[in-house]
Image (cartoon, helix red, strand yellow):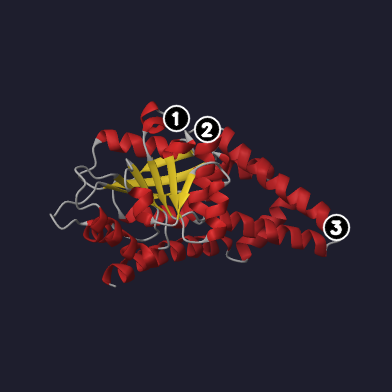
């Protein structure tokens, strides 16, 4: 964690799962908890955040009043109202905080419009798509910055994400953030669904639920570790496991016959399209 991030006053607008994952990762890395303030309207989520030792409030304006970096972690449907509320409260601020938005689909154009102050100023904004493994320091994130973001501000956002992510990829076109959403933002759920189905298959063939669960979880973890630590491409790792006319080949042929490749492709495209659709719909609201 950089000294710049350690000294910065951080504000999280929204204390849901993704904000909680990032905050949990920051706390685990030793961030000064008193430099973190979370605004969250729901008592349950606010209490959960308070239990980590960070400051909490139900007021967005109070949480953001002296922030150097503000993480916008609210649902896309309420983003416009929150941005406009903060912009009105910042009319007298000499300098504006760096905004890191993790609101899926909401474009820079919309964010700039909603955050615009009465005097015409607007804050520097970075769109980020993290994922929930950030809670374990194993996140994967994509980032895209508006043209007015300085290198120092990019470094600050990078430090924020690197503190909870093993991979933080800057993309050079904003539309690619929607692709990151479809691939890694939603990606953990794809693997959880796969493990769910592996467990049920094992149970259906005679294993106990406990046995099937332990085997499926460790298989997923072990395969993931091989992917990260091996220098081989995923395709080569698959080949290494697949003996000619063996059990794995039989399973993979079944996948192929069921259109597995097309199913995965459709899933990623559906999530990507939904992110774009959210941005277009809410931007016009």
Q: Is residue 138 above or below residue 85?
A: above
Name the residue tied to disc 2. 29
Tell me which numbered mark, 3 or 2, is placed earlier along the sequence: 2
**In the image: residue 204, left or right of residue 194:** right
x, y percentage for residue 86? 29, 56
x, y percentage for residue 264? 53, 60
Mark in front: 1 vs 3: 1
x, y percentage for residue 219? 71, 46
* SS class, disc 2: loop
Please rate how many residues cluster around mark 3, counting C-alpha atoms within 10 Å: few if below 14, some from 14 to 19, many from 20. Answer: few
Marks 2 and 1 in Cβ contact (< 8 Å) = yes
Q: Quadrant of residue 103?
A: bottom left
Furthest toward the left, the residue is 119
Name the residue tied to disc 1. 1
Q: Residue at x 37, y 38 (%)?
A: 9
The numbered disc on residue 182 is: none
Q: Is residue 284 above or below residue 18?
A: below
For the residues labelled 3 and 2, the Cα–Cα distance comes to 38 Å
**In the image: residue 76, left or right of residue 264:** left
Q: Quadrant of the C terminus?
A: bottom left
Residue 273 seen from this side: no
Name the residue tied to disc 3. 208
Q: Residue at x 75, y 62 (%)?
A: 200
């Amino acid at each position: 964690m950089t000294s710049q991030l350690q000294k910065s006053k951080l504000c999280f607008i929204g204390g849901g799962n993704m904000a909680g994952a990032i905050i949990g990762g920051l706390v685990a890395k030793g961030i000064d908890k008193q430099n973190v303030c979370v605004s969250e309207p729901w008592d349950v989520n606010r209490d959960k955040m308070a239990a980590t030792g960070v400051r909490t409030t139900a007021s967005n304006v109070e949480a953001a009043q002296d922030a150097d970096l503000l993480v916008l972690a609210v649902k896309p449907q309420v983003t416009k109202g929150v941005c406009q509320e903060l912009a009105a409260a910042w009319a007298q601020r000499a300098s504006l905080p760096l905004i890191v938005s993790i609101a899926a689909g909401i474009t820079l154009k919309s964010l700039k419009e909603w955050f615009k102050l009465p005097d015409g100023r607007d804050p520097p904004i970075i769109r980020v798509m993290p994922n929930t493994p950030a809670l374990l320091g194993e996140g994967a994130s994509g980032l895209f910055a508006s043209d007015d973001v300085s290198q120092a501000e990019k470094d600050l956002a990078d430090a924020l994400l690197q503190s909870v992510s093993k991979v933080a990829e800057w993309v050079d076109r904003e539309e690619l953030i929607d692709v990151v959403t479809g691939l890694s933002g939603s990606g953990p759920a794809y693997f959880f669904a796969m493990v769910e189905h592996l467990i049920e298959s094992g149970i259906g063939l005679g294993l106990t639920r406990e046995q099937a669960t332990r085997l499926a979880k460790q298989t997923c973890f072990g395969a993931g570790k091989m992917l990260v630590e091996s220098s081989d491409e995923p395709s080569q790792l698959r080949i290494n496991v697949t003996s000619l006319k063996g059990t794995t080949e039989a399973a993979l042929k079944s996948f192929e016959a069921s259109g597995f490749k097309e199913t995965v492709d459709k899933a990623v495209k559906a999530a990507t399209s939904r992110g774009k659709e959210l941005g277009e719909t809410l931007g016009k609201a």
